[in-house]
Image (cartoon, grey):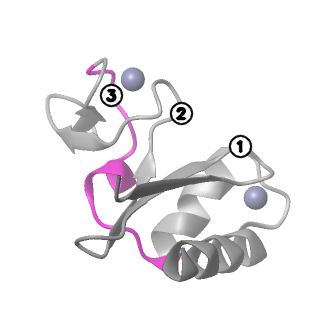
């Protein structure tokens, strides 16, 4: 198993594939990754095909992490994103 997942205190879910060195956000509905599809953002949940924000369709970076945790009403999105990226990178 090369996928590690991380859930922030505010409830945002992230995954990191340590084999290919790629991290990404997981959808709030199914804890799945996003993929291109028919939605206003152009991205849908890979599991249930519900429309999800476009940041689910691209590899993780700090700005995307901030958006993702802010969407879970994180009180400290910048710090939360920094901590999350650090955790995923050191996993
Ligand atoms: Zn879903
Ligand atoms: Zn947070």
Can you identify the residue that label 2 sits on? 28
Q: Indicate whether residue 55 is drawn in magenta.
A: yes
Q: Is residue 2 above or below residue 80?
A: above
Kindly report the secondary structure that dominates the magenta region of the rendered protein. Answer: loop
Which quadrant: the C terminus?
A: bottom right
User: How many marks can you see?
Assistant: 3
- At 47% from the left and 67% from the top, the residue drawn is 64
Where residue 51 appears, as percent x and y from the top left, is 33, 28
Residue 11 badge: 1
Q: Earlier in the sequence, mark 2 or mark 1?
A: 1
Where residue 28 appears, as percent x and y from the top left, is 53, 33
**Image side of residue 72 versus residue 45, left or right:** right
- At 55% from the left and 60% from the top, the residue drawn is 67
Q: Earlier in the sequence, mark 3 or mark 2?
A: 2
Mark 3, other Cα within 10 Å: few <14 / some 14–19 / many ≥20: many
Q: Is residue 69 above or below residue 49?
A: below
Q: Magenta stretch: give its range.
A: 49-62
Q: Is mark 1 within 8 Å of ligand 2?
A: yes
Can you identify the residue that label 3 sits on? 51
Where residue 37 appears, as percent x and y from the top left, is 14, 33
**Image side of residue 9 versus residue 16, left or right:** right
Whether residue 42 appears in this view of the structure is no
- At 20% from the left and 41% from the top, the residue drawn is 35
Circle 1: element type = loop
| Circles 3, 2 touching at the beta carbon (< 8 Å) | no
Mark 2, other Cα within 10 Å: few <14 / some 14–19 / many ≥20: some
Q: Earlier in the sequence, mark 3 or mark 1?
A: 1
């Amino acid at each position: 198993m090369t996928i590690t997942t991380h859930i922030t205190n505010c409830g945002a879910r992230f995954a990191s594939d340590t084999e290919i060195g790629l991290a990404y956000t997981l959808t709030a509905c199914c804890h799945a990754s996003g993929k291109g599809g028919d939605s206003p953002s152009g991205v849908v949940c890979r599991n249930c095909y519900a429309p999800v924000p476009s940041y689910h369709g691209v590899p993780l970076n700090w700005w995307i992490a901030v958006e993702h945790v802010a969407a879970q009403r994180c009180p400290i999105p910048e710090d939360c994103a920094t901590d999350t990226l650090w955790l995923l990178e050191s996993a």
